[in-house]
Image (tube, rainbow, N blue to C red):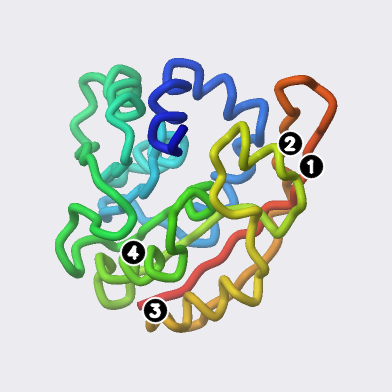
Amino acid sequence: MKSKNYFDEVAPEWDRLRESFFSKAVRDKALSVADVQTGHIAADIGCGTGFITEGLVQRGLKVIAVDGSEAMLSEMKQKFAGLDLIDYRLGEAGSLPIPDETVDYAFANMYLHHVEAPAEAIKEMARILKPGGMLVITDLDEHNFEFLKREHKDRWMGFSRGDIKKWLEGAGLRGATVDCVGENCCASSSCGSEKAKISIFVASGKK
């Protein structure tokens, strides 16, 4: 099963699953690092059912929400029905459906470990930023829990913070930093014999 198929399948349950994996503290940290401002435009890349988007619209930002799963976007549209601050777009990591220099912020929460080429995905997210815009990534530190690849279709078993910083700088972003969110991602294998507890990092850089 490919990653897209997995997310199509779990979309109706995703909000409940996400709550079991990590808390809203991850979102709060990401938005704090970005210092988001009302009236600006943000992209939520790999938006799922709108975990990051929810925090952004609560702060009065317009959001371009991008995901590769039609089912996830469908769930998200139902959740935010009637709200005109969100522009939903189907798209993939290597070719985001957003023009150059469009957004003030780009967020990618638990997205990078599902993409085929993380360094290229970061360059693509940097492309859509306006000059002075900020990219914020929240994702998993390196780990050795193989069941996440089997059951959750993760492509990568987390990342070294050194690699993340190198990729941000390679995308032309300034002031690249990688820090700890202070939160763990927790998951259990389907048979319950394995339990993962993985620290979450927040990385950022400005165009």
* Whether residue 10 is situated above or below residue 119 in the rendered picture: above
User: In the rendered structure, which amino acid carries the disc numbered 4?
Assistant: Met
- Cα separation between marks 2 and 1: 5 Å
Spot occupied by residue 55 in the image (x, y as percentages of width and height)? 44, 39
Spot occupied by residue 25 in the image (x, y as percentages of width and height)? 64, 42
**Residue lying furthest right in this view?**
193
CB contact under 8 Å: marks 4 and 3: yes
- Determine whether, in the image, residue 126 is placed left or right of residue 200: left
Residue 19: quarter of image? top right
**Mark sitting earlier along the chain (2/4):** 4
Residue at image location 54% in from the left, 61% down from the top = 33
User: In the rendered structure, which amino acid carries the disc numbered 2?
Assistant: Cys
CB contact under 8 Å: marks 1 and 4: no
User: In the rendered structure, which amino acid carries the disc numbered 1?
Assistant: Lys
Q: Secondary structure at mark 2?
A: strand
- Cα separation between marks 2 and 4: 27 Å
- Which residue is tagged 2? 186
As rendered, which of 131 and 195 lies closer to the eye?
A: 195
Q: Secondary structure at mark 3?
A: loop
User: In the rendered structure, which amino acid carries the disc numbered 3?
Assistant: Ala
- Which residue is tagged 1? 197
Mark 2 burial class by Cα count in 10 Å: few <14, some 14-19, many 20+: some
Q: Secondary structure at mark 4?
A: helix
* Whether residue 96 is situated above or below residue 206 in the rendered picture: above
- Determine whether, in the image, residue 101 is placed left or right of residue 26: left
**Mark sitting earlier along the chain (2/3):** 3
- Cα separation between marks 2 and 3: 30 Å
